[in-house]
Amino acid sequence: MTATAPVGMSSSAVLGTGRVALVTGASRGIGPLIAREVARAGGHVVLSARSAEDLRAVTSGLTAAGADVSFLPADLTSPGASQALVTEVERRHGGIDLLVNNAGGDPLREFHAMTIEENLRTLELNLVAPVALAHAALGGMLSRGRGHVVNISAMAGRVAFPYTEVYAAAKDGLIGFTRVLRNDYHARGVSASVIILGAIRGSGQGQRMLDEAAMKANAFMAPADSVAKAVVKAVRRDRAEVVVMPGPARLLRAVMDYFPALGPAVSRASGANASMKTIIDLREARQGPRASGLASAGR
Ligand SMILES: NC(=O)c1ccc[n+]([C@@H]2O[C@H](COP(=O)([O-])OP(=O)(O)OC[C@H]3O[C@@H](n4cnc5c(N)ncnc54)[C@H](OP(=O)(O)O)[C@@H]3O)[C@@H](O)[C@H]2O)c1
C-alpha cells in the first residue's frame, strides 16, 4: 500500500458501524470497560483472554446492554497464539480495524525470588504478545489502508515502582514500540497510540491489591472507566500518548524522567516500597512463596 492517508486522519475510520475491534485482557479488570466503550462507538468488538467462562459472562452482559460483541479465548503466552487469534478474528469478521493490547499483569514478587523463566513470562505477556498481535494484524490493516493499534502501558518504569523490574521493562518497551510503529505506518493509514496508566482504582490489579491489604485508594489513583474513555479518545483524536493519572502525578512523572535517581527516594517516602512489600508478604503467607506467579498475576 502506498502513502494515501493524510497525517492525523488515518485512524478516524476505525470505529463505528462495519468496523471490527479486538480487545485483549477483556475477561476481567479494565478490559471489559474498554470493550464496552469501544462497542459504544459502534461496530463489532471481539473480546479475548484465557478464561472462556469469564469471557462468556462479560460478553453476555455487554450483549444484554445492546453491544455487538463476541469472544475468542486465547493464552497469549502460548507459542503461535497471537497469530492464531488474529487469523481467526479475520476469518470470522473479515479484518481487524482496531487492536487494543490490554492483556497484561505483574506477579508482584521479588525479581531474585522468581526463576528466570517466571520473569520471562512477564515479558512474554506484557511485551512479546502485544508485538506479535500487532505484527499479525498489520498486514490486513495495510491492505485495507486503515487500522489503529492501542497499547496499554504503565508508569511502573517511569516512577521506579517497587518490585516490577521485568514488568517495568516490558511496559517501557511498549512505549518505544508504539512510537516507532506510529512513525513507520501512519502515512499508510495505520496509527498507534500508547495509554500510560498510573495506579487505577475501581477495577483491575491495583484495586485487587488494595482489597487484599485492606488499604484505601489514594488521590494518585484514577478511576478504571477513565482508561476506557482514554482508549476511545486516543483513537478518535489519533493521540500518540495519553497518560491516565490525576493531575499532580503527571508532574511527578515529568520530574522523575528528568531526575531518574530520585526514584528510590520517592518510592520510600511515598510508602510504595513498604505497601508493596506488605502485599507480597501477605500473599506469600496465604498462598506460599511459589503460588503468586504470573498464572495468578494481578488476581
Ligand atoms: N490496574 C492497574 O492499576 C494498572 C496500572 C497500570 C497498568 N495496568 C495495565 O492495564 C492492563 C489491564 O490491567 P488490569 O488491572 O485490568 O489487569 P487484570 O484485572 O489482572 O486483567 C488482566 C487481563 O489479562 C488477561 N490475561 C492474563 N494473562 C493472560 C494470558 N496469558 N493470555 C491472555 N490473556 C491474559 C486476563 O484474563 P485471563 O486470566 O482470563 O486470561 C485479564 O482479562 C494491563 O496491561 C496492566 O498491565 C493496570
Image (tube, grey):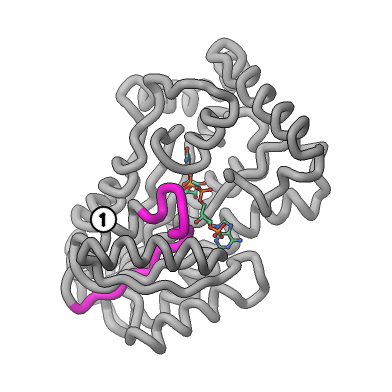
Kindly identify the residue that appears in the image at 38 percent across and 87 percent down.
Answer: 92
Left or right of 221 on screen, residue 191: left
Q: Secondary structure at mark 1?
A: helix
Instruction: Give above or below for 32 relative to 268.
Output: below
Task: Point out residue 117 in the picture as x, y percentages from the top left corner.
Answer: 79, 55
Kindly identify the residue that appears in the image at 74 percent across and 34 percent down.
Answer: 286
Kindly identify the residue that appears in the image at 55 percent across and 64 percent down.
Answer: 51
Towards the viewer: 273 or 51: 51
Task: Point out residue 104 in the picture as x, y percentages from the top left corner.
Answer: 54, 52
Instruction: Give above or below for 175 relative to 82.
Output: above
The quarter in which the C terminus is drawn is top right
Task: Point out residue 82 in the picture as x, y percentages from the top left corner.
Answer: 55, 73
Towards the viewer: 250 or 113: 113
Q: Which residue is mark 1?
A: 37
| Residue 23 part of the magenta-drawn span | yes
Instruction: Give above or below for 106 relative to 177.
Output: above
Q: Residue furthest top?
A: 269
Residue 184 appears in the figure:
no
> Label 1 sits on what residue type?
Glu
Which residues are the magenta region?
Answer: 18-32
Instruction: Give above or below for 170 relative to 64.
Output: above
Kindly identify the residue that appears in the image at 41 percent across and 89 percent down.
Answer: 91
| Residue 20 part of the magenta-drawn span | yes
